Image: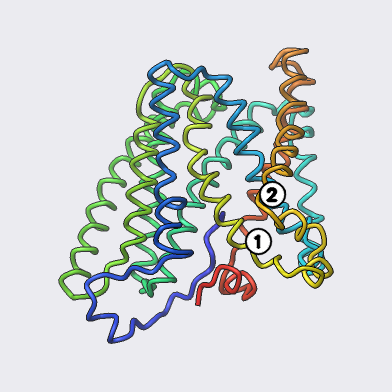
Amino acid sequence: MAAPTIQTTHAVPEAARSRAVSVRWIISAREDLVWFVGSVASSYLLFGLYVAGVLPLFPMLLAWAVLVDAPHVFGTFSRTYFDREERRARKRLLWWSLLFFAVGPLMVLAGLALVFFFLAALWAYYHLVKQHYGFMVLYKKKNGDLAPADNALDRLFILIAMTYPFVAFVARDAGAMQRVPTPLAGVISHLSTALFVATVAITILWISRQAQRAIRRQPLDVPKYLLLAAAIPMHWVVLLTPMPQQPIAVVAILTVYHNLQYHRLIWFHNRKYAGGAEARERHGAAELISRRLLYYVAFGVLFGLWYQLPRRLVGEAYGQQSTLAQLAASFFWGYAFIHYHLDAKIWRVRRDPSVGKALRMD
């Protein structure tokens, strides 16, 4: 999920200034603490089981990919391509996005497979970070935490603090370095050092700003703090702890938290499709998909089977490094790219009042 666009000028009401803390949730305290904050436990659980040798790599990856990750991609499609109203409103965005299916195969055929998969991995990680940033922005909007200085500082803090462990992991892991194009391999270590210094500096500045807010009796945004405390340390722990086949294992371990957050937000948003015949007329298949949780899960898993199994079967039959396997893998990356791209457009609360209404941001 990309960050919703927010106003950069916001006067905090005088009554709010007198409160020590601000605690407003997206759905409710229980739902948010379970799904948007507490679901980080799923990443720690996979991490612990895998590092302890209890959970084998490929069963973990396959179950995660088919049952959790691919359905969360389908969640985006449920509120875009399958929504009749959205297809009319975002016609150009949705149909032009289908060109992402051609990007990977064209790069593979051009001899740029390594570059393609490297860029795909970068976009995938950036997408994780941007979703956490997006949830942070929702909490900031909910809690009136929209001072320009805080907006800029919060953004820098989460982006830098979550970029460093990723770059440090790549610099230290031989398997990850093999996936880096040669011209970039020599600068990764220096970039890691620079990002570590930047992370220390921005963390000190961010903590100092929170202390200043407390001293000035400006309300402290508790949900934002809880989200950051869940997301940032988990990325550091998972990425900086050595483990077998780490470049592959961390994909599932890091992303399962992101998946569960997104599923809950999608299900909350898709409640707007409730309404019987009128909703069916307006939204088409989106109403059926979201009519019951069982339907949403079943459609998502069916999509997961289509999304994950064909490319894996091709890889097993012809070898993962064969041109045919790379073409299949790069084609199916198109689904993820569309998901990343659409997510950057469809959650803009200020620009799209219907999204703010569905998420009850007022």
Q: Tag 2: Cα neighbours inside 10 Å, few (<14), some, or many (≥20)? A: many
Compared to residue 283, the image places residue 343 above or below, namely above
Answer with the quarter of the image where residue 95 lies.
bottom right
Q: Position of residue 98 (x, y in %)?
A: 79, 48
1 relative position to 101: left or right: left
Q: Residue at x 44, y 45 (%)?
A: 39
Residue 138: in sight, yes or no? no
Left or right relative to 150: residue 296: right
Please indicate, yes or no, whether residue 107 appears anywhere in the rendered image.
Answer: yes
Q: Secondary structure at mark 2?
A: helix
Position of the N terminus by quadrant:
bottom right
User: Residue 2, how many percent across, how many down?
Assistant: 56, 56
Is 181 situated above or below 210? above
| Tag 2: amino acid | Tyr
- Who is closer to the viewer here, 191 or 1? 1
Where is residue 292, by image quadrant?
bottom right
**First of labels 2, 1 by sequence position:** 1
Q: Which residue is mark 2?
A: 296
The structure residue drawn at horizontal position 66% and vertical position 39%, both measured from the top left corner, is 70
Q: Is residue 145 left or right of residue 276?
A: left
Q: Residue at x 38, y 36 (%)?
A: 165
| Structural distance between the alpha carbons of marks 2 and 1 | 10 Å
Q: Image point 57% across, 26% down: which residue?
A: 61
Residue marked by disc 1: 270
- Mark 2–mark 1 CB contact (< 8 Å): yes
The residue sitting at the left extreme is 215
Q: Position of residue 337 (x, y in %)?
A: 68, 44
- The type of residue carrying mark 1 is Asn
